[in-house]
Structure formats: structure tokens, C-alpha cells
Amino acid sequence: MWYGLAADAIVAIHVGYIAYVVLGQLAIIVAAPMKWQWARNPWFRLTHLLAIGIVVYEAVYGLRCPLTVWEEQL
């Protein structure tokens, strides 16, 4: 029973990660011409760039996302 709950939790984390990458990029594009300061926050930019870098690394080297692997195992 706990396997299903753990898998659901990992799916929620995975969806959040994807949303952070996609919606974060859209937010930066929208905020840049409007000069909103939160979009220039270095921590936001750094973590967003790191999240994108991880996805690119996995795609270039043909690696499967660990979250996907864990979801399937559970």
C-alpha cells in the first residue's frame, strides 16, 4: 500500500520539477520586458538554470530521469 503513496509523491515531485522548468522560463520571458525584480533574483535564475542543465545533461547522454525510474519501480 505504501508503494502507491510513495509513487504518487514522486509523481507530484516530478510534476513540480517540470512545472518549475517550463513555467519558470515563461515567467522570465514575461518579466524581462516589464523589468520585474523578482525575475532577476540570482537564486531563482541559478536554480532554474541548474534544473534546465540537469534535463539537458540527461537528454544529451541518453539517461533516464531518476524520478521516472523510481516511479516505475514503485
Image (tube, rainbow, N blue to C red):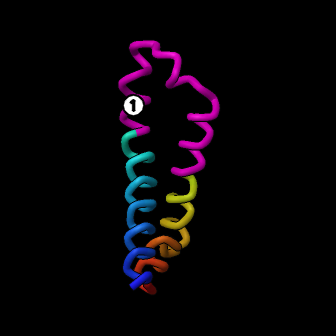
Is 50 situated above or below 31? below
- The residue lying at 44 percent from left, 20 percent from top is 32
Tell me if mark 1 has few (under 14), some (14-19) or many (20+) residues whose alpha carbon lies within 10 angstroms of its own.
few
Quarter of the view holding residue 5:
bottom left
Is 74 situated above or below 33? below
- The residue lying at 48 percent from left, 71 percent from top is 67
Quarter of the view holding residue 15:
bottom left
**37 left or right of 7 in image:** right
| Total marks placed | 1
**Quadrant of the image containing the N terminus:** bottom left
Is 31 situated above or below 5? above
- The residue lying at 56 percent from left, 23 percent from top is 40
* Residue 42 lies within the magenta run: yes
Q: Where residue 59 sits: x, y (%)?
A: 48, 66
Is 36 situated above or below 43? above
Q: Which secondary structure, mark 1?
A: helix
The residue where tag 1 is placed is: 27
Q: Residue furthest top?
A: 35
Q: Where residue 74 sits: x, y (%)?
A: 43, 84
Magenta stretch, main secondary structure class = helix
- The residue lying at 37 percent from left, 70 percent from top is 8
Quarter of the view holding residue 17:
bottom left
Q: Which of the two residues, 34 or 15, is positioned nearer the viewer here?
A: 15
Q: Which of the two residues, 60 or 53, is positioned nearer the viewer here?
A: 53
Q: Where residue 55 sits: x, y (%)?
A: 50, 59
Q: Where residue 39 sits: x, y (%)?
A: 50, 25
Segment tinted magenta in the rendering: 24-52
Q: What amino acid type is highlighted by mark number 1?
A: Ala
* Residue 41 lies within the magenta run: yes
